[in-house]
Amino acid sequence: MSPTGTNDSGTNGLGPSALSNAISRRHVLQLFGIAGVGAAGIGSLTACSPSNPTAEGDKSGGGGNKEFHGAYPYQLPPKGHFNLAAGVTDGIQQQSPYLDLVYPSGGMYYWADKKWEYMMAESSSLDEANNTYTMKLRTGLTWSDGKPVTAKDVVSTFNLRWLLRQQDWTFLSDVKAQDDTTVVFTIGTPSTVLERYILRAPILPDSVYGTWATQAETMRKAKTSLDSAEGKKLNGDFQKFRPENPVVSGPFNFDTKTMTNAQMSLVKNDKGLFADKIGFTKVVLYNGETSDITPVVMNKDVDYATHGFAVASEKTFQSNGFRILRPPVYSGPSLVFNYTTHPEFADARVRQAIAYVLDREENGTVALGESGKPCKFMAGFSDILIPDWVSDADQQKLQAYEKDLDKATQLLTAAGWKKAGDKWQTPAGKPAAYDIKFPTEFADWNPAATNAADQLNKFGFNITKRGITFTQLNPDVLAGKFDISIQGWGASNHPHPYFAFVQDLYTFNYVIAANSGGKGMNFPLKQTTSAGPIDLQAVVDKSAQGLNVDEQKKNITAAAMAFNELLPIIPLWERYGNNPALEGKRVAKFPADDDPILKNAPYADNFVIMGMYSGKVGPV
């Protein structure tokens, strides 16, 4: 299962204009100037047909091919394609951690240590006085066609990112090559999250994309609006661009001739970054969501998978010799309400009451076993990150909403709700009857929705469960075609809380839903709390601006306190991976359970990919 997050974009500021490329699948940095460590130290999907494994089995010994077997959904050509610029739809894989092996970025990040591992970059630095950020590429890098990787490739990459409204251009005003290996980024709006955007952007070849990038640069420098006819045409034309033979800089490339609907292979590119450090000669990826991949894992055809597996499957994996790795995902499922069609939810006491009804530990255990952990702070972003941003004193003020049916009853009664027999009625005298929509295919969100509905029904609600295909859920919620829905909270791709609040408050709200003509949940972001009035959008936008982290902490704390009191959405639990990892067949070993690298989010700076680059994850 891939992360739910936002693929945000914009022009200036961090407001709704910065968020026009709304939704990708489930689901930043700390400060400028954090030095990278040495290279030797080091990581929207469409429903797929069931996998039918045809790999040649164990090729790990005796000097033959040394294969790594993974799993991640992809789209088979011709619908899936090899225009992998960020913001282009229907790329062969989107948000896949394995793309870091094909198109590496400037660096990858250690979430626990808050340090960068430079990849394509050799160094980077901020010049705060001149508002510039400089990235120096390693010398000697080459593309798979033998051409050198240069600063021109980076400039072209970022001009395309401007064309495709990527959010780095919320903060940037220009990018240029100083020499063949030096790129200078001019900062328009200083922000501590910009470094992550720069260093984690996959670098694309100018030889393939240069014509488009040059047109984009000309348009950008002429200050032509992307909303103009000219801007829309160039964007639309580029969306249709289909490179046939991928030219890559990573240690692996797509084997386009052997790709099937069941699996594809990444084959070794000896010219690629750190190819000499990687012991594997091939990466086999099986296609599909959880239901497709579970039997493939059972058959030991997969060495490692990031899907959200059912509890029963996890136990079977363990009995078959798999380790279960549990990295934090920094997000999870939540209840999202439709405030337009059901104004009774607008009273915060109602949402607080629902939170008190739910035994969220039970919900997480039913859905994901040990990997579904109830939130302690209910602050809208991961409990793991809270100590970095919220003081001990303010943490004490955050309500945990542990199950308390008496409190729930008191709150609903105070809000004007009444019981008719054993069923609740709203202040308007209508039955508290609602549908809850959830993605049928998700082996964790499906039981989470079912259990939440059962708990609410036992308390006196009348909840009808509506499982629908996951590709339809997001459009329905954005269009306001729901009563209650399961959607993600938090952010799996970035450690800065700003991105979690974007997911919580913008992604399925009118801020982003307006791009598709809807209002989503339609929760007003101007609210009044016990601390007084608050404009949540202004507070969240400011939480990522500037380079003063103390000022950011003030805004993040204000947003966290307001979220905790208002509960615009109700987090059910925080997801940890239950990633099956098979040692001794093809892979010698995976990181130990107490290795700090397991604090990395598996969908952002994947610890297995980082381990491959360093040689720490290698063949038997």
Image (cartoon, rainbow, N blue to C red):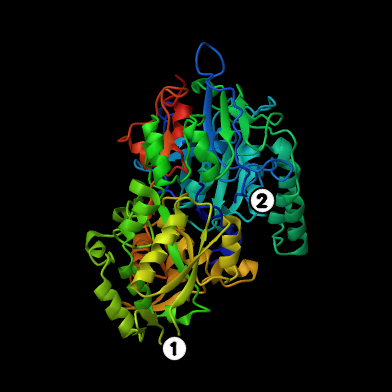
Q: Which residue is mark 2?
A: 89
Q: Is residue 506 visible?
A: yes
Q: Secondary structure at mark 2?
A: loop
Query: In the image, residue 378 lies at what x, y percent?
Result: 33, 62
430 up-or-down from 178: above or below: below
> Residue at image x 34%, y 60%?
553
Which is more foreground, mark 1 or mark 2? 1
Query: In the image, residue 183 lies at what x, y percent?
Result: 58, 41
> Residue at image x 24%, y 75%?
406
Q: Secondary structure at mark 1?
A: loop
Q: Identify the disc placed on residue 428.
A: 1
Real-space Cα distance between discs 1 and 2?
44 Å
Q: Which quadrant holds the C terminus? A: top left
Q: Is disc 1 in contact with disc 2, using a CB cutoff of under 8 Å?
A: no
Image quadrant where residue 52 sits:
top right
Query: In the image, residue 119 lies at what x, y percent?
Result: 50, 33
Give the left or right position of residue 143, taking residue 439 as reference: right
Disc on the earlier residue, 1 or 2: 2
